[in-house]
Image (tube, grey):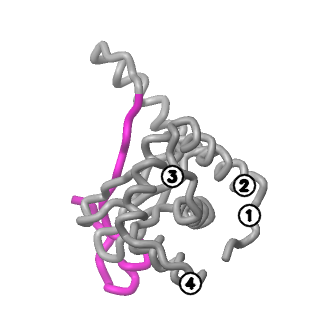
Amino acid sequence: MSLPLSPELQEALEIFRRYLRERSLPVTSQREQVAEVLFAAGGHVSVEDIEELLRKRGLHVGKATIYRTLDLLAQSGMVHERDFGEGFRRYERVPGHPHHEHLICLRCGKVVEFSNERLEKMKELIAAEYGFQHRHHRLEIYGVCRECQQRDGVARTST
């Protein structure tokens, strides 16, 4: 059962199909379903999240197929694989997604994306200071989100 997709997500799915065909890999309905669910989900989803979203649509796709499809999506450059130290990986769609950093809550696992112009300027300054030619970077800030602080009564102090 396929849900209506936005033109942007339809285009992303077609790009994935083309990627598979160009490598003489089968374009299966299961691969398409995994890609479609991931593209539509947005954010940072785990294999278990994808499995649950497929199940809600009345679809059964084996975990091995989900993993293999995610590997293909990552190899294609359409998806970034993220490891936030939770013991599992999360995946996010790349096309049309501007560069961003992550705040990760150590209590609930919430991941917040953010962009900061000052940070973008600082990375260039820092690289230049040390004689580096900047190619890419990743910033992950681990802490406790506002909701968990309020719920658990955690003091807002920095270490």
Callout 4: 10 Å neighbours few (<14), some, many (20+)? few
Which residue, given by chain and number where applicable, does mark 2 sit on?
Answer: 10
| Residue 75 covered by magenta stretch | no
Question: Which circle marks residue 56 in the picture?
Answer: 4
Determine whether 128 is above or below 106 in the image.
Answer: above
Task: Label 2, secondary structure: give it.
Answer: helix
Image quadrant assignment for residue 68: bottom left
Residue at 62% in and 64% down: 40
Q: Is residue 151 magenta?
A: yes
* Rendered residue at 53%/65% (across/down): 30
Instruction: Nearest to the eye among marks 3 and 2: give it.
Output: 2
Quadrant position of residue 130:
top left
For disc 2, the neighbor class at 10 Å (few under 14, some 14 to 19, many from 20) is some
- Label 1, label 3: how far apart the Cα atoms are: 26 Å
The three-letter amino acid code for the residue at tag 4 is Lys
Region rendered in magenta: 136-159
For the C terminus, which image quadrant? bottom left
**Front label number (1 vs 3):** 1
From what the image shows, is residue 13 above or below residue 106?
above
Return the disc, 1 or 2, that comes first in the chain's sequence.
Answer: 1
- Asked if the residues shown at circle 1 and circle 2 are in contact, with their CB atoms under 8 angstroms apart, the answer is yes
Q: How far across and down, in percent of the image, does residue 86 sit?
A: 26, 66
**Amino acid beneath label 3:** Phe
Q: Residues within 10 Å of mark 3 (few under 14, many from 20)?
A: few
